[in-house]
Every structure is written in structure tokens, then in C-alpha cells.
Amino acid sequence: MSSYQQFQSVEHLLCWFSFKLLGSAQHTLRAFTRHPSVVSRLLSTMAPTAKYNVLFVLGGPGAGKGTQCEKIVAKYGYVHLSAGDLLRAERADKTSKNGDLIEWYITNGAIVPVEITIELIKNAMENTTSTNSFLIDGFPRNKDNLDGWTKIMDDKAEVKQVLNFDLSEEECLARAMKRGETSGRTDDNVESFKKRFVTFKESTQPIIDHFEVKNLVTTISSVPGPDEVFVEVCKVLDNLQ
Ligand SMILES: Nc1ncnc2c1ncn2[C@@H]1O[C@H](COP(=O)(O)OP(=O)(O)OP(=O)(O)O)[C@@H](O)[C@H]1O
Ligand SMILES: O=c1ccn([C@@H]2O[C@H](COP(=O)(O)O)[C@@H](O)[C@H]2O)c(=O)[nH]1
């Protein structure tokens, strides 16, 4: 007689099966109560983890994004991730296979493919343990950047606000050239600046417009001095929860 033939009906078989299930559930519960630390570890892996809070910081080349980010960090304790700085650090890393490619894009005022940039941003966020609030400066700069962000980060991060620093091309150029006297940056020269500004207008402005439609953008004039600009920044950040 096969093991199933001992049951007189399907109902009988199902009944027997339910008792078995209940028995093992009871056994598991008893094991859990003997090991509360296992239970709390299990629960913590099941609980939804909080999303990163993100502020994107955009604006023309030399408009003062980095300057304001420093002030925001000092007052509000965000972690500042400058996409440009992350790319420059990767370019300087002798072991990176992307160094030459990044150099070409930066000098030509063009935008590095998002696969490279998003990996750097994601790693920097994941390696931060002090906070889950980030200022992402100079990203996303074009549709490729935005698509990459959406694909990789949308379920991990919430974009709370986009700060857009507004300054004329002439003033951006003047500030970038002044900075170039000491920065050592390969793109603080007139030729690179012109290309960067075209990229900003053609590729980044549509991204600002995209967030504008979502009511996430605050545009702040960068014409006054850094402290006055920061007063306007504080008005925005004080109202963010
Ligand atoms: N409000 C301001 N008034 C006058 N000068 C400023 C102001 N903000 C920044 N600067 C100066 O302008 C230069 C560019 O500023 P900053 O590096 O912050 O710009 P950025 O937008 O981050 O530039 P980039 O996109 O090229 O990295 C710096 O030398 C900085 O000291
Ligand atoms: O998301 C990004 C950010 C930057 N780049 C390249 O770096 C330079 C300099 O960036 P800054 O933000 O001004 O420091 C920029 O012109 C791009 O070439 C990028 O490709 N993607």
C-alpha cells in the first residue's frame, strides 16, 4: 500500500496535512521564543528601510553651487556629494579604467555616461553611515543622468528639493576665470567654460524644467554675495521636513 492509500478520502489526507503544518508552526514559534535576538534580527531585515533624503543642487558652471553646499553642510549637516568632485577623484585614481575617458568629458564640458557617475554616487551614499540626507551637487545634468538615477536610485532615495542657482553667463565666466587662477581645474579656461555653458543650457536646463513640473525647484539668484544667497537657501531648507 502506498503511503497515500492509508487515507480514506482526499479530505482525510488534507486534514492530516494541516495537522502536520500546525505542528511545525508550533515548533518554529517555540524555537523563536527561546531566541529573541534571532526574532528581532529577522524583523529588522523585514522592516522597510528609510529612503535617502536628497537635495539636488543645480545651476550654471561657476554659479556658486559648491560654495552654498559648504554652508548647507555646516548649518544643516547634510553630506555633500559633488558629482564633479567624485569624477575628478576617479580620474586621479591610477587603478581606474575610466580616468582618460573622464578627462576627455571634463575638458570638453561634456557629460560623462551615467553608468560611471551613478556608481560613484551610489557607493558614496552607501558608504555614509552618519546620515541619510544628501546634497547631490551638479547632478543630474542631462536626460541620460536622470534616467540612470531613476533606474538605480528611485526606489532608494526621495528627491525632496532641487536648488537652482541662477547667474548670467558673463558672471559665471568671470567667477570661473577668477577661480581658475588657483583651482588647477582643467576646465577653468574660456574654451572649456563656453562648452560647459552650452551643455548647461541645452542639457541641464531641461532637467531643471522636468523637476519644475513636479514643483520641486527653488531658483535662487546667485548675484549677491555668498552670505546673502545663503539667507535665501535657509528659507527653503527651514521649510523642508
Ligand atoms: N555669491 C557669490 N558671489 C561672488 N563670488 C562667489 C559667490 N559664490 C561663489 N563665488 C565664487 O565663484 C567661484 C565659483 O563658485 P563655486 O565653485 O561654488 O561654483 P560652482 O557652481 O560649484 O562651480 P562648478 O559648477 O564649476 O563646479 C568660486 O571662486 C567662489 O568663491
Ligand atoms: O554628473 C556629472 C557632474 C560633472 N560632470 C563633469 O564634470 C565637470 C565638472 O563638474 P562640476 O560640477 O562643475 O564640478 C562637468 O563639466 C562635466 O564634464 C559630469 O560629466 N557629470
Image (cartoon, rainbow, N blue to C red):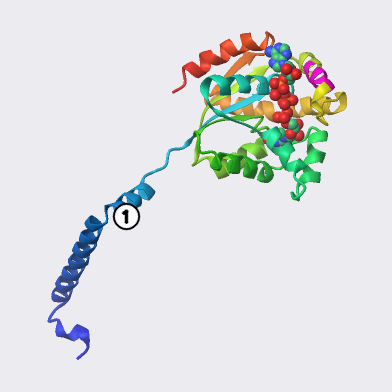
The magenta-colored residue range is 175-181
- The relative height of residue 13 versus residue 232 in the rendered view (above or below) is below
Quarter of the rendering containing residue 123: top right
Q: Residue at x 36, y 47 (%)?
A: 44
Q: Quadrant of the C terminus?
A: top left
- The kind of residue tagged 1 is Val
Quarter of the rendering containing residue 105: top right
CB of residue at label 1: within 8 Å of ligand 2?
Answer: no
Q: Which residue is mark 1?
A: 38
Residue 184 in picture, x, y percent from top left = 82, 28
Q: Residue at x 79, y 32 (%)?
A: 109
Q: Residue at x 63, y 45 (%)?
A: 119
Q: Residue at x 27, y 56 (%)?
A: 35
Residue 161 in picture, x, y percent from top left = 53, 25
Q: Is residue 131 magenta?
A: no
Which of 106/214 is in front?
106
Which of 219/106 is in front?
106
